Image: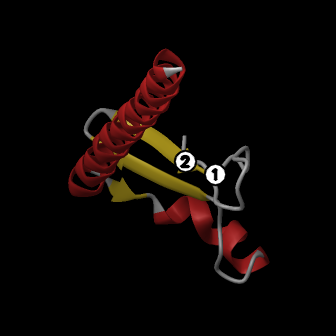
Amino acid sequence: MLSIVLFRTYSTVSEIAFRLQQEKYVMQDSLSFSQILQNMADTSKIEYSRYESQLQASSGLTDILYLHDEQGSYSVFTTGACVSSAYELT
């Protein structure tokens, strides 16, 4: 009887530890992504010329951010692939 109680307690504790570890990984990834975005914001400039037709057609809203820096041009955009209503940046 005691072993059943101890096994259940151990299972619960190990499940909680696993969840906490997964949350830690998510937080680390979020921090890394935040630092990447900050670096992009510090070193890149927005290519406003690429928005002329898009912004007029969409009342000033867009899902694509066109950037350029010393290394070249790139874009950040929403994919809409997330499970939640929030968008995923790629």
For this orientation, the residue located farthest to the right is: 57
- Amino acid at circle 2: Leu
- Amino acid at circle 1: Thr
CB of mark 1 within 8 Å of CB of mark 2? yes
- Residue position marked by numbered label 2 in the rendering: 89
- Residue position marked by numbered label 1 in the rendering: 78
Disc 1 residue crowd, few under 14, some 14–19, many 20+, Cα 10 Å: some
For this orientation, the residue located farthest to the front is: 1
Coloration of the structure image: secondary structure
| Secondary structure category for the residue under label 2 | loop
Q: Which mark is residue 90?
A: none
Q: Quadrant of the C terminus?
A: top right
* Image point (63%, 70%), residue name: 52
Dot placed on the residue nearer the N-terminal end, 1 or 2: 1
Can you give x and y, in whole percent of width and height, for residue 47 in the image? 45, 58
For this orientation, the residue located farthest to the top is: 3
